[in-house]
Structures are given as C-alpha cells and as structure tokens.
Amino acid sequence: MEEFQTMERKRHCKPAFDKIPKEKQERILGAAAKEFAAMGFTAANINVIAKKAGISIGSMYNYFSAKEDLFLTVNDQGYEVIAEVVNTVAAQEGDIFHKIETLIRAVQKYARLHTELNQIYLDITSQGLSHLSSKLSNQLETITAGLYHRLIKEAQDQGIVSSSIDPCVGAFCIDNLIVMLQYAYASDYFAQRLKIFVGEDALDNDEKMVRGIMLFIRKALAP
C-alpha cells in the first residue's frame, strides 16, 4: 500500500528556523502548541509564545513571518504524527476491521500523548478559522479519507464489505465516528456528551469504546 508523505515544515517557516538546533525548534513549537491550545489562534499572543520559549520576539520573527505561519507549522507537526499513524496502520497485515481497530486504539493513545495538538485540531474546525479551513482540511483530512476509501474498496473486492456501500460515504461515516471520539479527549463539552451517550466510564474504559465502535462498524459494513 502506498505511503502517505509527511509535510516539510519549511513550507511555513523561514530558512533560519531550519538552521537552529532541533531542541530549540521543539521548544518553540511546544510553547506555541500550548498557547494555541489554551487561547485559540485569534487570542494567542506571539510575544507570550516567544517569552515562554526563551527567545526574543525579534528572533521569533526571524523564524516566522507572522503568527499564522507559526500556527501552520504547529499544524504540520500534528499532520506528521497523523501521517505516521496512518502509514503504520496501512502497512499492517489484516483486514479492514483489524486496521480500523488498530487506528481507534492509536487515536486513544495519540489524544492522551498529544493533548495540545488534539485541542488545536478541534479548534481549527471553528468558524473563526474559516480563512484557513480549506488549507487545513485538505492537509489533515485527505490522508484519512484516502485510507478509509482504499480499505473499503479492498474489502469489497474481498467480499467482506457490502458492495452496495459507497466507499466515499462509508469513509466519511467511519471518520466521523473516530473524530468524535478524538474530540472527547480535547473538549469538556464533547467529553460530557460522550458520557451522556455511553456512560460515565466512557473515557476511562478504552476497551468498552473499542468493542462498541467496532461492533457497530462491522454490522454497518457487513454484506
């Protein structure tokens, strides 16, 4: 299966950023991720980010032309994490159901390990970032859309998924299930929503969620 390519950070940062030590790059992007996750893109302050990263504001603008470029670079970092997960799942042996289950488990792990990136992913869906929506959705969603579409087509050829299912619509439905689960780890509102539907232990009982979602998907896709 063809691998999905990760994106180069240099698309949004200046050449000077690529020349500094990796530890310093990670410190700057880590401070930026925390500020964007806590405040949102609009309210986030690039001066605050520079201070928390331990650099001058002049240095920050030597690395990024504007706050938007810094934000997009942080999102590139999130994309790289997602691409790595998708490539790992796509390369595994097993049928569509095994791969989707593996992806759900990876999402549960990702959401806990990368809380700021997960919060930013939720925030970029807001209307306040509509000027970036086309660029960000094309970048972040295309990779998973391609994976689900391909898995469904292959499973239809194998006779384990109904041939009456439109692969594009099926991919959209599967992604919605997983995205809503991911949101529950980033937002108090979506966490409470999940508990209302599934129970108070929903976010603490990963196996319950995996089993429930996979049973639903198997029944929905069955021939």
Image (spheres, rainbow, N blue to C red):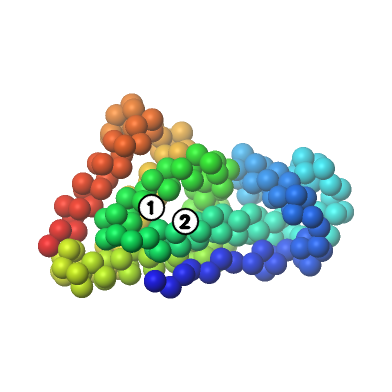
Q: Residue at the spot x=81%, y=62% of the render?
A: 19
Q: Residue at x 77, y 40 (%)?
A: 52
Label 1 amino acid? Answer: Leu
Q: At numbered mark 2, what does the secondary structure look like: helix, strand or loop?
A: helix
Question: Residue 220 at x, y = what percent?
Answer: 18, 55
Residue 103 circle label = 1
Looking at the image, tell me whether mark 1 or mark 2 is earlier in sequence order. Answer: 2
Residue 13: image x %, image y %? Answer: 73, 63
Three-letter code, disc 2:
Val
For the view shown, which residue lies furthest in the left direction?
223
Which labelled disc corresponds to residue 88? none
Q: Is residue 176 visible?
A: no
Q: Where 110 sits versus 164, above or below?
A: above
Whether residue 202 can be seen here: yes
Q: Are marks 1 and 2 in contact (CB under 8 Å)?
A: yes
For the N terminus, the image quarter is bottom left
Seen from the viewer's position, the closer of residues 97 and 82 is 97
Who's the residue at 77% across and 44% down the image? Answer: 53
Mark 1 burial class by Cα count in 10 Å: few <14, some 14-19, many 20+: some
For disc 2, the marked residue is 85
